[in-house]
Image (cartoon, grey):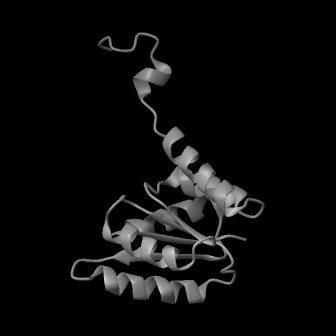
Amino acid sequence: MIGLIVCTHGKFSEELVRASEMMFGRQDNLQYLTFEPGESAEDLVDRYKAALNKLEDKQAVLFLVDLFGGSPYNAAGRVAAENQNSMDVVTGVNLPMLLEIYGTRKFSSLPELVDIAMSAGSSAIKSFRANFDTNAGEDL
């Protein structure tokens, strides 16, 4: 099963994983990290490597981070670059993305899981008016 490491600025990753496990149950082969004020990207690289050592299955790992270009992304990218074909990084982690990944990672390849994550994450963004109001744009 593909390993997951979720990392965000602050405690968002911890709470996101907790919320997802309320709906989908406790997940194996998953670690989360929080990036706190005062930490450096180098600190995070070391913490990612420690998290990798805690995964049961390290043959393929997907890092899920909050922002493209942020420290969690940059540090994950450095680790993934050292493991060219067995790791990838997806930004914009959200609850629908995690739930879809949980349901498909046992039978998906890493490239397939990356596509699933990106699709689930973006397709879950909805507008009330655009989806439910036939008079979109008019006042309620």
Query: Quick check: 131 left or right of 23?
Result: left
Image quadrant where residue 13 sits: bottom left
Q: Looking at the image, which residue is at 57% across and 73% down?
A: 84
Q: Looking at the image, which residue is at 51% across and 47% down?
A: 121
Residue 102 appears in the picture as rendered = yes
Which residue appears farthest toward the right when viewing the image? 107
Nearer to the camera, 95 or 77: 77
Image quadrant where residue 110 sits: bottom right
Taking 16 as reference, is 40 above or below it?
Answer: below
Percent across and percent down for residue 92 are 43, 54
Nearer to the camera, 111 or 95: 111
Percent across and percent down for residue 28 are 67, 75
Nearer to the camera, 83 or 47: 83
Query: Quick check: 80 left or right of 47?
Result: right
Taking 115 as reference, is 25 above or below it?
Answer: below
Total marks drawn? 0
Residue 11 appears in the picture as rendered = no
The quadrant of the image that shows the C terminus is: top left
Percent across and percent down for residue 39 are 26, 82
Percent across and percent down for residue 27 are 64, 71
Q: Looking at the image, which residue is at 57% across and 78% down?
A: 83
The quadrant of the image that shows the N terminus is: bottom right
Which residue appears farthest toward the left when viewing the image? 38
Q: Looking at the image, which residue is at 56% across and 84% down?
A: 52
Taking 140 as reference, is 59 above or below it?
Answer: below
